[in-house]
Amino acid sequence: MIFGTCPKCSSHEIYRGISTEGEGLTPGSYPLLAEIRAGSEQTTLWIDTFICKECGHVELSVANPDALALLPQADGWERVTPEKDSPQEED
Ligand SMILES: [Zn+2]
């Protein structure tokens, strides 16, 4: 999806919010922000939203990956293991 093709319906009608470098947030640019904190350190993940016009599939991607360095230590976040990720498929 980030590369312009919907993984669900193969459409190329993909839209994303546009961010304006250096001018802060604009409506539609980063509809989602995630504040993460680890002890006294804090950072904000800016989350790009990609939407397929044809089928409504949505993908999210962090736009400032440098901020991800804090994620493994962040309070309230845990790494998802494959077992926890798909409990409904265990029979
Ligand atoms: Zn689609």
Image: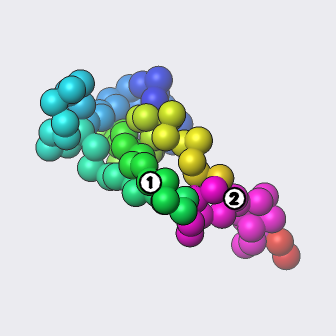
Q: Secondary structure at mark 1?
A: strand
**In the current view of this chain or complex, which residue is farthest to the front?**
40
Q: Residue flagged by tag 2: what amino acid is it?
A: Arg
Gap in angstroms between the C-alphas marked 2 and 1:
18 Å
Q: Residue at x 47, y 23 (%)?
A: 3
Q: Residue flagged by tag 1: what amino acid is it?
A: Gln
Q: Residue at x 44, y 54 (%)?
A: 42
Count of numbered circles in the view? 2
* Quadrant in which the C terminus is drawn: bottom right
Foreground of the two, 80 or 41: 41
Foreground of the two, 91 or 24: 24
**In the current view of this chain or complex, which residue is farthest to the right?**
91
The image position of residue 90, as x and y in percent, is 83, 72
- Where 65 falls versus 79 (above or below)? above
Sequence order check, earlier mark of 2 and 1: 1
**In the current view of this chain or complex, which residue is farthest to the bottom?**
91
Left or right: where does residue 51 sit relative to residue 65? left
Q: Which residues are the magenta region?
A: 73-89
Sort mark 1 into few (<14), some (14-19) or many (20+) by Cα contacts within 10 Å.
few
Residue 42 marker: 1
Q: Residue at x 57, y 48 (%)?
A: 70
Q: Is mark 1 within 8 Å of ligand 1?
A: no
The image position of residue 14, as x and y in percent, is 34, 32
The image position of residue 20, as x and y in percent, is 20, 27
- Which residue position holds label 2? 79
Res 9 visible: no
